Image: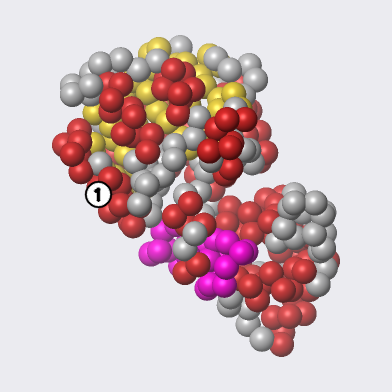
Amino acid sequence: MKHIPVLLKEVLEGLDLSSGNIVVDATLGLGGHTRQILDRIGPAGKVIGFDKDERNIKLAKENLLEVKDRVEFVYSSFAHIGDYVKEPVDAVLFDLGFSSVHVDDPERGFSFMYDGPLDMRYDQDQALSAETIVNGWSKEDLIELFRKMGEEEYAPQIARAIFDARRKERITRTLQLVEVIETVVHRHGKQHPATKVFQALRIAVNDELGEVEQGLESAIKVLKTDGRIAVITFHSLEDRLVKRFFKASDELEVLTKKPIKTSSNEIKINPRARSAKLRIARKR
Protein backbone atom coordinates (compact mmCIF):
# COMPACT_ATOMS: atom_id res chain seq x y z
CA MET A 1 0.00 0.00 0.00
CA LYS A 2 1.46 3.34 -1.10
CA HIS A 3 0.79 6.99 -0.31
CA ILE A 4 1.23 9.98 -2.63
CA PRO A 5 3.21 12.61 -0.70
CA VAL A 6 1.68 16.08 -0.95
CA LEU A 7 3.70 19.15 -2.06
CA LEU A 8 6.78 16.93 -2.24
CA LYS A 9 9.01 19.17 -4.38
CA GLU A 10 8.12 22.23 -2.32
CA VAL A 11 8.79 20.41 0.97
CA LEU A 12 12.19 19.12 -0.12
CA GLU A 13 13.26 22.55 -1.37
CA GLY A 14 11.80 24.35 1.64
CA LEU A 15 13.58 22.17 4.19
CA ASP A 16 16.91 22.91 2.44
CA LEU A 17 18.20 19.39 3.07
CA SER A 18 21.76 18.20 2.54
CA SER A 19 23.80 15.03 2.93
CA GLY A 20 24.05 13.68 6.48
CA ASN A 21 21.07 15.63 7.85
CA ILE A 22 18.91 14.27 10.66
CA VAL A 23 15.21 14.86 9.96
CA VAL A 24 12.06 14.30 12.00
CA ASP A 25 9.06 13.18 9.95
CA ALA A 26 6.43 13.95 12.58
CA THR A 27 3.68 12.32 10.52
CA LEU A 28 5.27 9.23 9.03
CA GLY A 29 2.09 7.74 7.56
CA LEU A 30 3.11 5.20 4.93
CA GLY A 31 6.55 6.75 4.47
CA GLY A 32 6.02 8.73 1.25
CA HIS A 33 7.81 11.90 2.34
CA THR A 34 10.39 9.94 4.34
CA ARG A 35 11.53 7.95 1.30
CA GLN A 36 12.20 11.11 -0.70
CA ILE A 37 13.87 12.82 2.27
CA LEU A 38 16.23 9.85 2.60
CA ASP A 39 17.22 10.24 -1.05
CA ARG A 40 18.15 13.87 -0.35
CA ILE A 41 20.12 13.30 2.85
CA GLY A 42 22.04 10.28 1.57
CA PRO A 43 23.43 7.20 3.35
CA ALA A 44 24.84 9.29 6.22
CA GLY A 45 21.45 10.87 6.96
CA LYS A 46 18.66 9.61 9.19
CA VAL A 47 14.90 10.09 9.58
CA ILE A 48 13.06 9.76 12.89
CA GLY A 49 9.47 8.96 11.96
CA PHE A 50 6.49 9.36 14.32
CA ASP A 51 3.02 7.88 13.99
CA LYS A 52 0.46 7.04 16.65
CA ASP A 53 -1.32 4.54 14.41
CA GLU A 54 0.36 1.16 14.91
CA ARG A 55 -0.86 -0.06 11.53
CA ASN A 56 0.77 2.90 9.77
CA ILE A 57 4.08 2.05 11.43
CA LYS A 58 3.79 -1.54 10.19
CA LEU A 59 2.96 -0.46 6.62
CA ALA A 60 5.73 2.17 6.60
CA LYS A 61 8.26 -0.47 7.63
CA GLU A 62 7.15 -2.60 4.68
CA ASN A 63 7.32 0.33 2.24
CA LEU A 64 10.75 1.41 3.51
CA LEU A 65 12.17 -2.07 3.88
CA GLU A 66 15.38 -1.50 1.90
CA VAL A 67 16.20 1.74 3.75
CA LYS A 68 14.81 0.88 7.20
CA ASP A 69 18.28 0.94 8.77
CA ARG A 70 18.25 4.74 8.24
CA VAL A 71 14.83 5.21 9.81
CA GLU A 72 13.98 5.24 13.51
CA PHE A 73 10.31 4.28 13.80
CA VAL A 74 8.50 5.79 16.79
CA TYR A 75 5.02 4.58 17.73
CA SER A 76 3.85 7.79 19.40
CA SER A 77 2.10 11.08 18.76
CA PHE A 78 4.28 13.90 17.47
CA ALA A 79 3.19 15.83 20.56
CA HIS A 80 5.92 13.84 22.34
CA ILE A 81 8.82 14.52 19.96
CA GLY A 82 10.91 15.87 22.82
CA ASP A 83 10.57 12.63 24.79
CA TYR A 84 12.15 10.58 22.00
CA VAL A 85 14.51 12.89 20.10
CA LYS A 86 17.62 13.43 22.16
CA GLU A 87 19.87 14.96 19.49
CA PRO A 88 19.56 18.27 17.63
CA VAL A 89 17.94 17.81 14.21
CA ASP A 90 18.22 19.72 10.95
CA ALA A 91 14.58 19.71 9.91
CA VAL A 92 11.07 18.73 11.01
CA LEU A 93 8.13 17.99 8.73
CA PHE A 94 4.45 17.86 9.70
CA ASP A 95 1.92 16.62 7.13
CA LEU A 96 -1.35 17.12 9.00
CA GLY A 97 -3.64 15.49 6.45
CA PHE A 98 -5.20 12.28 7.67
CA SER A 99 -4.11 9.26 5.70
CA SER A 100 -6.10 7.84 2.80
CA VAL A 101 -5.58 4.51 4.59
CA HIS A 102 -7.99 5.81 7.23
CA VAL A 103 -10.48 7.33 4.79
CA ASP A 104 -10.69 4.24 2.61
CA ASP A 105 -11.10 1.74 5.43
CA PRO A 106 -14.78 1.66 6.52
CA GLU A 107 -13.83 -0.12 9.74
CA ARG A 108 -12.00 2.98 10.98
CA GLY A 109 -15.13 5.12 10.72
CA PHE A 110 -13.53 8.26 9.28
CA SER A 111 -15.62 8.53 6.13
CA PHE A 112 -19.24 9.57 5.66
CA MET A 113 -19.22 7.72 2.32
CA TYR A 114 -19.01 4.20 3.73
CA ASP A 115 -20.85 2.34 6.45
CA GLY A 116 -18.67 1.47 9.40
CA PRO A 117 -18.37 1.78 13.17
CA LEU A 118 -18.43 5.37 14.41
CA ASP A 119 -14.81 5.29 15.57
CA MET A 120 -12.31 7.85 14.11
CA ARG A 121 -9.45 6.96 16.48
CA TYR A 122 -5.92 7.09 15.08
CA ASP A 123 -4.68 5.33 18.20
CA GLN A 124 -6.85 2.25 18.62
CA ASP A 125 -5.79 1.90 22.27
CA GLN A 126 -7.41 5.15 23.41
CA ALA A 127 -10.88 5.12 24.98
CA LEU A 128 -12.49 8.20 23.40
CA SER A 129 -14.19 7.57 20.05
CA ALA A 130 -16.68 9.41 17.86
CA GLU A 131 -19.40 7.09 19.12
CA THR A 132 -18.63 8.15 22.70
CA ILE A 133 -18.95 11.83 21.80
CA VAL A 134 -22.10 11.51 19.68
CA ASN A 135 -23.95 9.48 22.30
CA GLY A 136 -22.50 10.89 25.50
CA TRP A 137 -21.88 14.61 25.15
CA SER A 138 -24.55 17.14 26.07
CA LYS A 139 -26.47 19.04 23.41
CA GLU A 140 -24.63 22.24 24.35
CA ASP A 141 -21.21 20.59 24.08
CA LEU A 142 -22.08 19.15 20.67
CA ILE A 143 -23.18 22.58 19.44
CA GLU A 144 -19.90 24.12 20.61
CA LEU A 145 -17.88 21.28 19.02
CA PHE A 146 -19.58 21.54 15.64
CA ARG A 147 -19.28 25.33 15.65
CA LYS A 148 -15.64 25.54 16.72
CA MET A 149 -14.06 22.49 15.12
CA GLY A 150 -16.35 22.13 12.12
CA GLU A 151 -17.28 25.77 11.53
CA GLU A 152 -20.78 24.36 10.95
CA GLU A 153 -23.50 27.03 10.67
CA TYR A 154 -26.24 24.49 11.40
CA ALA A 155 -24.57 23.27 14.61
CA PRO A 156 -27.62 23.82 16.91
CA GLN A 157 -30.02 22.07 14.53
CA ILE A 158 -27.66 19.11 14.00
CA ALA A 159 -27.00 18.75 17.72
CA ARG A 160 -30.74 18.73 18.44
CA ALA A 161 -31.33 16.12 15.72
CA ILE A 162 -28.58 13.90 17.18
CA PHE A 163 -29.98 14.36 20.67
CA ASP A 164 -33.47 13.33 19.54
CA ALA A 165 -32.20 10.37 17.49
CA ARG A 166 -29.99 8.92 20.23
CA ARG A 167 -32.89 8.91 22.70
CA LYS A 168 -34.56 6.36 20.43
CA GLU A 169 -31.46 4.25 19.75
CA ARG A 170 -27.70 4.56 20.18
CA ILE A 171 -25.90 5.96 17.12
CA THR A 172 -23.12 3.47 16.40
CA ARG A 173 -22.57 3.59 12.61
CA THR A 174 -21.25 6.27 10.26
CA LEU A 175 -24.18 6.16 7.84
CA GLN A 176 -26.58 6.18 10.77
CA LEU A 177 -25.11 9.55 11.77
CA VAL A 178 -25.14 10.75 8.16
CA GLU A 179 -28.89 10.05 7.96
CA VAL A 180 -29.48 12.16 11.07
CA ILE A 181 -27.42 15.05 9.67
CA GLU A 182 -29.24 14.90 6.34
CA THR A 183 -32.56 15.53 8.08
CA VAL A 184 -31.21 19.00 8.85
CA VAL A 185 -28.55 19.86 6.25
CA HIS A 186 -29.02 19.44 2.51
CA ARG A 187 -26.24 19.31 -0.05
CA HIS A 188 -24.92 22.68 -1.26
CA GLY A 189 -22.65 22.35 -4.29
CA LYS A 190 -19.99 19.66 -4.03
CA GLN A 191 -19.70 19.55 -0.23
CA HIS A 192 -21.41 16.63 1.49
CA PRO A 193 -23.80 17.66 4.32
CA ALA A 194 -21.81 15.60 6.86
CA THR A 195 -18.37 16.99 5.97
CA LYS A 196 -18.06 19.56 8.75
CA VAL A 197 -19.52 17.37 11.51
CA PHE A 198 -17.20 14.50 10.64
CA GLN A 199 -14.25 16.92 10.62
CA ALA A 200 -15.21 18.24 14.04
CA LEU A 201 -15.58 14.75 15.50
CA ARG A 202 -12.24 13.61 14.08
CA ILE A 203 -10.45 16.65 15.50
CA ALA A 204 -12.04 16.16 18.93
CA VAL A 205 -11.46 12.40 19.11
CA ASN A 206 -7.77 12.80 18.35
CA ASP A 207 -7.22 16.20 20.02
CA GLU A 208 -5.69 17.27 16.74
CA LEU A 209 -5.31 21.00 17.40
CA GLY A 210 -3.91 20.49 20.90
CA GLU A 211 -1.43 17.95 19.59
CA VAL A 212 -0.36 20.22 16.73
CA GLU A 213 0.48 23.01 19.17
CA GLN A 214 2.39 20.64 21.46
CA GLY A 215 4.15 19.13 18.45
CA LEU A 216 5.26 22.53 17.15
CA GLU A 217 6.60 23.50 20.56
CA SER A 218 8.50 20.20 20.81
CA ALA A 219 9.86 20.60 17.28
CA ILE A 220 11.38 24.01 18.01
CA LYS A 221 13.19 22.57 21.03
CA VAL A 222 14.90 19.81 19.07
CA LEU A 223 15.74 21.94 15.99
CA LYS A 224 19.29 23.17 15.47
CA THR A 225 19.88 26.86 14.88
CA ASP A 226 19.11 27.50 11.18
CA GLY A 227 17.11 24.26 11.14
CA ARG A 228 13.81 24.38 9.30
CA ILE A 229 10.26 23.34 10.09
CA ALA A 230 7.64 22.70 7.42
CA VAL A 231 3.94 22.18 8.08
CA ILE A 232 1.31 21.04 5.59
CA THR A 233 -2.28 21.78 6.64
CA PHE A 234 -5.57 20.82 5.03
CA HIS A 235 -8.21 22.99 6.69
CA SER A 236 -8.48 26.56 7.92
CA LEU A 237 -8.39 25.76 11.66
CA GLU A 238 -4.98 24.09 11.38
CA ASP A 239 -3.62 26.69 8.98
CA ARG A 240 -4.61 29.57 11.26
CA LEU A 241 -3.06 27.80 14.24
CA VAL A 242 0.25 27.27 12.42
CA LYS A 243 0.27 30.82 11.05
CA ARG A 244 -0.29 32.30 14.53
CA PHE A 245 2.27 29.98 16.12
CA PHE A 246 4.99 30.85 13.60
CA LYS A 247 4.28 34.58 13.88
CA ALA A 248 4.24 34.57 17.69
CA SER A 249 7.47 32.60 18.16
CA ASP A 250 10.59 34.66 18.88
CA GLU A 251 12.68 31.66 17.84
CA LEU A 252 11.34 31.40 14.30
CA GLU A 253 11.81 33.39 11.12
CA VAL A 254 8.85 32.80 8.82
CA LEU A 255 10.03 31.98 5.29
CA THR A 256 6.60 31.78 3.67
CA LYS A 257 4.76 35.08 3.99
CA LYS A 258 1.86 33.38 2.24
CA PRO A 259 1.31 29.61 2.30
CA ILE A 260 2.46 27.54 -0.68
CA LYS A 261 -0.48 25.81 -2.36
CA THR A 262 -0.73 22.78 -4.59
CA SER A 263 -0.50 23.25 -8.35
CA SER A 264 -3.33 22.35 -10.71
CA ASN A 265 -1.17 19.51 -12.06
CA GLU A 266 -0.73 18.00 -8.61
CA ILE A 267 -4.45 18.25 -7.91
CA LYS A 268 -5.16 16.34 -11.14
CA ILE A 269 -2.89 13.52 -9.97
CA ASN A 270 -4.01 13.64 -6.34
CA PRO A 271 -7.41 15.37 -5.86
CA ARG A 272 -7.13 15.02 -2.06
CA ALA A 273 -4.25 17.50 -2.14
CA ARG A 274 -6.45 20.37 -3.35
CA SER A 275 -6.79 22.08 0.04
CA ALA A 276 -3.17 21.60 1.14
CA LYS A 277 -1.14 24.61 2.31
CA LEU A 278 2.55 24.60 3.23
CA ARG A 279 4.20 26.99 5.68
CA ILE A 280 7.95 26.98 6.40
CA ALA A 281 10.03 28.65 9.11
CA ARG A 282 13.69 28.71 10.16
CA LYS A 283 14.98 28.60 13.72
CA ARG A 284 16.99 31.70 14.57
Q: Quadrant of the C terminus?
A: top left
Q: Is residue 260 above or below residue 109?
A: above
Q: At x 40% / y 15%, what residue is drawn?
A: 16
Q: Which residue is mark 1?
A: 62
Residue visible at 52% across and 43% down?
Answer: 97
Q: Is residue 41 above or below residue 145?
A: above
Whether the magenta-drawn stretch holds residue 186 is answered as no
Q: Is residue 28 left or right of residue 112?
A: left
- 100 or 90: nearer the viewer: 100
- Asked where in the image residue 243 lies, by quadrant, the reply is top right
Q: Residues within 10 Å of mark 1 (few under 14, many from 20)?
A: some
Total marks drawn? 1
Is residue 22 something that shows in the picture? Answer: no
Magenta extent: 108-130
Residue under the point 25% across and 49% down: 62
Residue 120 lies within the magenta run: yes
Indicate the position of residue 27 as horizontal and vertical percent values.
41, 41
The percent coordinates of residue 258 (x first, y second) are 65, 20
The residue type indicated by label 1 comes to Glu
Judged left or right of residue 269, residue 41 is left
Q: In the displayed structure, does residue 206 sit left or right of residue 28?
A: right
Looking at this view, name the residue that lies furthest to the bottom.
168
On the image, the x and y values in percent for residue 209 come to 57, 44
Quarter of the image for residue 85 reads top left
User: SS at mark 1?
Assistant: helix
